Image: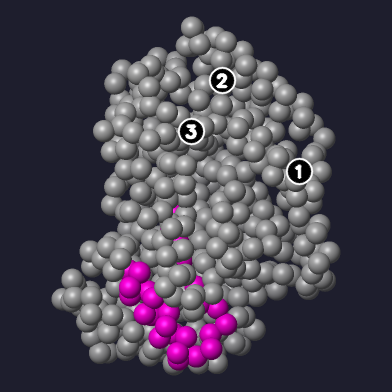
Amino acid sequence: MGVMRFRVSPPGFLDGWPEAEQAYISGFDGRVFPTRVEREGDELVCRRPSSDSGRLHVAWPVPGFGRTLISTSSLREQDTVYLLALELARGKIGQLRNQLAAWEISGMSVPEGFDEASRQAHQIFARATSAQDDPDEACRFSEAALVHAHNAAQMLTGAYINQRLAVRCQRSKRFPALLGCGLAGESPTQWESLPGGVFNSATLPICWNRIEAIEGEYEWEESDGLVDWTVEHKLLPHGGPLLDFGVDGLPEWLGAWSGDLENLQSFVCDFVETAVSRFVGRIRVWELASRVNTGGALDLNEEGRLALLARAVEVARGVDDVEQLLVRIEQPWGGYQSAGDHLLSPLQFVDALVRCAPGLSGIALEITSGFVPADPGRRDLLDLSRLLDIWSTLGLPLYVTIAAPSSGGQDAGGRFVRSAKFDDPESSESEEWTETLQADWVDAVLPLLLAKQSVAGITWAHLDDRGPSGFPTSGLLDGTGAPRPVVQTIHAHRFGHWPAN
């Protein structure tokens, strides 16, 4: 068994650091090792089956930037203990330098002030490395270096967004992506509360476990009404996910066939064919399945899910010439692999699916912040940009679903919303999510998504907070039906760059 030890400073810090339990180690290819995290005094001990070199990922409080998920550089196992803050600073500075080099090669202009912030990060980090005989002093320097590295990363990413948006606006005089919102099961009577023209698409919950809750009895009235409503409001309808491979995501009666892959395939194909056939010519974008990489339904392993999905793609393509056929990826960074229940990383899973199901035409990614356990810490824009670039290497358009909570607490389904600070220059301590923080998160993330040529669609997860949801309190409308501040933020970015349409 491989073991890595990290000293945490100051003494006692581990007692008030709950995110430490969600730390994990990844390999050079991005695959996350099954990781068991233990606390021994002021040391964080990470145990895993492999002794290969790896990068530790953990949420760390950075003044002015909140509890941000940071990774070390690739570390080998050794008998001596690593200083955690020092290695996190080394990893962040290395990430910053690598991204700078990549963007400069592509022709990006470095923003004013970046060189100074980067220089300060390097100088303070050098002092940290020379002070390792005094771990507390080395950690103080490392934390200061992290602040400067994050400042530099923020400047660099901001310049990248501005320059790429300028190019995209020049290439396309019309809004170049689908911008949509997820609807609940009934026609949204409060839709008129939204500013006109913000969204050009809507995602309709045409899901197997809602439509065929009882075997052989189909309930289409709700779906038919939603499709009619989108046509009336001149929105492009997205259907799905038809299949939900998460826990309790498939019809309960299907449990009798658990373990019988041949019969499961027959049932899956029958429903997919029935649903797509019903809306031929009316729904041209289908989200075939969600939670395909994380799974949980019917104890299906990765091989079983791949087999069902490949056949479902083939059936859907045979029914109608669908414009886009997507699968949704949950937790695209892959942190869930640390539990040891998955062999393939999210990217490897989709790559395997694309090879055996060439009819797949797009990938839907869930990009969220503030939900437990999917989000162990806030990701900065440099991390998000890198993630989107990695997924774009598959050569398929990306459709991104985004969500963030408007308040802290717990939803009716028992899922907690993590309290978190987005960007307070005075503190790195956590606080409850608010509608303002929700809008701030979107204000940072949405421009980056619009700047990426590979992103063909962006969907806000929920219009309102009615009913159970995987993303509690994330609706665009509050309990009275009034728009939350996030709506104005989306509106500003929607028309700020493409005002003519």
Q: Quadrant of the C terminus?
A: bottom right
Name which of mark 1 and mark 2 comes first in the sequence. Answer: 1
* Residue 118 position in % (x across, y down): 71, 28
Which amino acid, by three-letter code, is at mark 2? Ser
Nearest to the observer: residue 76 or residue 295: 76
The quarter holding residue 428 reads top right
From the viewer's perspective, tell me whether residue 141 is left or right of residue 80: right
Q: Give the camera-side residue of 172 and 424.
A: 172
Which range is magenta?
305-331
Which residue is depicted at the point 18% across and 71% down? 259
Q: Earlier in the sequence, mark 1 or mark 3?
A: 3
Q: Amino acid at mark 3?
A: Ser
Q: Residue at x 66, y 41 (%)?
A: 99
Q: Residue drawn 72% across and 69% down? A: 176
| Few, some or many residues within 10 Å of mark 3 (<14, 14–19, 20+) | some
Q: Which residue is mark 3?
A: 74
In the rendering, at what x and y percent does residue 325 appear? 50, 77
Amino acid residing under circle 1:
Glu
* Cα separation between marks 2 and 3: 17 Å
SS assignment at label 1 = helix
Residue 252 visible, this orientation: yes
**Residue receiving disc 1:** 104
Q: Is residue 471 visible?
A: no
Question: What element does badge 2 sit on?
Answer: helix
Residue at the spot of label 2: 142
